Image (tube, rainbow, N blue to C red):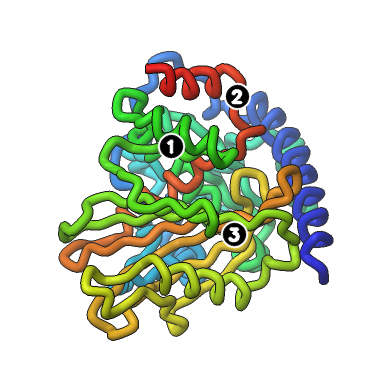
Amino acid sequence: MPYYCLIKIFNKKNNSMKTKFTFLLASLLISLFIFQACSTKQRAKGSEDEIFVIADSMEFIQVEKDLHETFGKIIYTPQPEELFKLQRKNLNILDRLKQRKNILIIAPLGSGSNTSDYLESIIDENVKKLIKSDSVFVINKYDLWAQDQLVMILTAPSVEKLKEKIIEKKDDLLYYFRDASNKRMAKGLYNKQYEQKKIEAQFLTNYGWMIYMQADYQVALESKDEKFVWLRRGMNTDMERWIFIHWIENGSPEFLHADTITAERNRLTKNYYRTTDDSAYVELYDDYKMDSEVNFNGKYALMTQGLWRFNDQSGGGPFISYTFYDEKTRRIYMLDASIFAPKYFKKSLLQQVDVLLHSFKSEYEVDPLEKEDILSALED
């Protein structure tokens, strides 16, 4: 199927999902007593990669494998690291967990288990009908018992249907927790006190896009002809972070093909990501590459995630890359982030650069007041 068709389908699906979840949230706000507003909520605590699962032991055993495949997805950094670690807990300690960042409550309706009875007691009869008719499976509530918290309820008429739905919707379920985690991290990373507005303003003026420029990053290289900008943090240390922005004018959605993107990335890194003595360059490690279709700030994109290595195999690390077609500017954008930190676990570092990539905006997407504020830095 041509990629312009995929983009239209993606946007249509997005709008449909928004309508569905708007209805769901509106219903649940009045139907679940646990969703009462609280004016003195504390900030959620705990690790970003920890999900506390409230479930009865026997029911958890039946869905455990599917939940681990959904949330415990392995990324190679190159050490294998799980995206989320699951901790099953009984319902009777839920009160002790209400300040945690990520909570999942799961049970089929009407099974007679403690968790099932709990869900029966808090869900309105109209919502139960939607669940039993297979119209509702996942219920998300943000900031329920604490700020910056996600509480997810997964339920269905039976364990079998629950398992089926988890498998069918696993990408969406993972996205909800990753997105909530990214938003929490963004609050810590996007700090105006440490923002390099002058560089952001230069990008906006010269190239028609901007990205949040943290204080510790520097512009390592700019090539107007190549339409390539390289941002670097921790140069010549044991914890380096590299971000590049590359764009193609008068692009076409047909470019959005995994092989085409891999070839373009390898071409760029061969030219620009080279060792100091110019003896080796960075290339993508095909054995650990995953490509998937994602929503990048409301746009259809191909995400490539995996490992890079020097072509002489002297080192390597993880990377994440998004490539999308910006219909309004008719540009193809490739936003790419890599980590080189041989002595450290890298999952958290990879998430940090991922969050920075998501700060990218085309000029037309920048709020006029924000644009005025950023461009004023050029006058200083």
> What percent of the width, then of the height, locates residue 291?
56, 70
When asked about the image quadrant of residue 36, the answer is top right
Give the residue drawn at x 37%, y 50%.
231
Q: Quadrant of the C terminus?
A: top left
Q: Secondary structure at mark 3?
A: strand
Residue 340 is situated, as x and y percent measured from the top left of the image, at 27, 64
> Mark 1 highlights which residue?
212
Tag 1, which secondary structure? loop
In this view, the residue in front, 189 or 216, is 216
User: Which secondary structure lies at badge 2?
Assistant: loop
Residue 16 appears left or right of 362: right
Q: Are marks 1 and 2 in contact (CB under 8 Å)?
A: no
Quadrant containing the N terminus in the rendered view: bottom right
- Crowdedness near tag 3: few (<14), some (14–19) or many (≥20) residues, C-alpha within 10 Å: many
Task: Judge whether residue 310 can be spotted in this image.
Answer: yes
Q: CA distance from mark 1 to mark 2?
A: 14 Å
Residue 166 is left or right of residue 178, and the answer is: right
